[in-house]
Amino acid sequence: HYTAAVQDIENGLVDMSIGPFWITGERLKLAAFTVPLIYDRTVLVIPKPGSKNSLSYQTSKVLAPFTAGLWGVVILVIV
């Protein structure tokens, strides 16, 4: 969505846009950016390698988004 705002600058629809933009290569091709006033601190959190690799744990992660009842409805719709 922020790339669309930068595209609007490129297309001449607006003169500038203000917001929490990340400066990406794609956006730099479309418009010029000022020096960032605030920097986001982004952190990627991943599980420790080798932890909880059992089949039952991995299966429970796949099934976790839906309740058992909803999985039943999904299966009935597919069949």
Image (cartoon, helix red, strand yellow):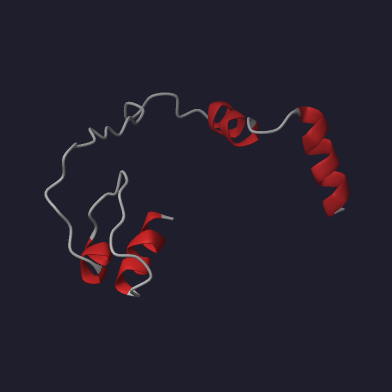
How many numbered badges does the structure rendering display?
Answer: 0
Residue 3 point in image, percent of width and height: 36, 60
Please, which residue is most extreme toward the front here? Answer: 15
Residue at left 80%, top 44%?
Answer: 74
Residue pictured at 32% horizontal, 26% vertical: 48
Q: Quadrant of residue 25?
A: bottom left
- Front residue of 26/32: it is 32
- Furthest-left residue in this view: 35
In the image, 33: left or right of 18?
Answer: left
| Horizontal side of residue 12 vs 67, given as left or right | left
Q: Give the quadrant of the N terminus.
A: bottom left
* Rendered view: 77 above or below 3: above
Find the residue positioned furthest to the bottom.
Answer: 11
Residue 57 or residue 18, whichever sits in front: 18
Residue at (86, 50) in percent of width and height = 77
Who's the residue at 19% across and 36% down the image?
38
Query: Residue 6 location in percent, x, y?
Result: 32, 62
Horizontal and vertical percent position of residue 33: 18, 57
Up/down of 3 relative to 11, above or below: above
Is 67 displayed left or right of 56 in the figure? right
Question: In the figure, is residue 12 to the left or right of 75?
Answer: left
Q: Is residue 73 above or below residue 43?
A: below
Residue 60: x and y in percent read: 61, 29
Out of 79 and 40, give the one closest to the viewer. 40
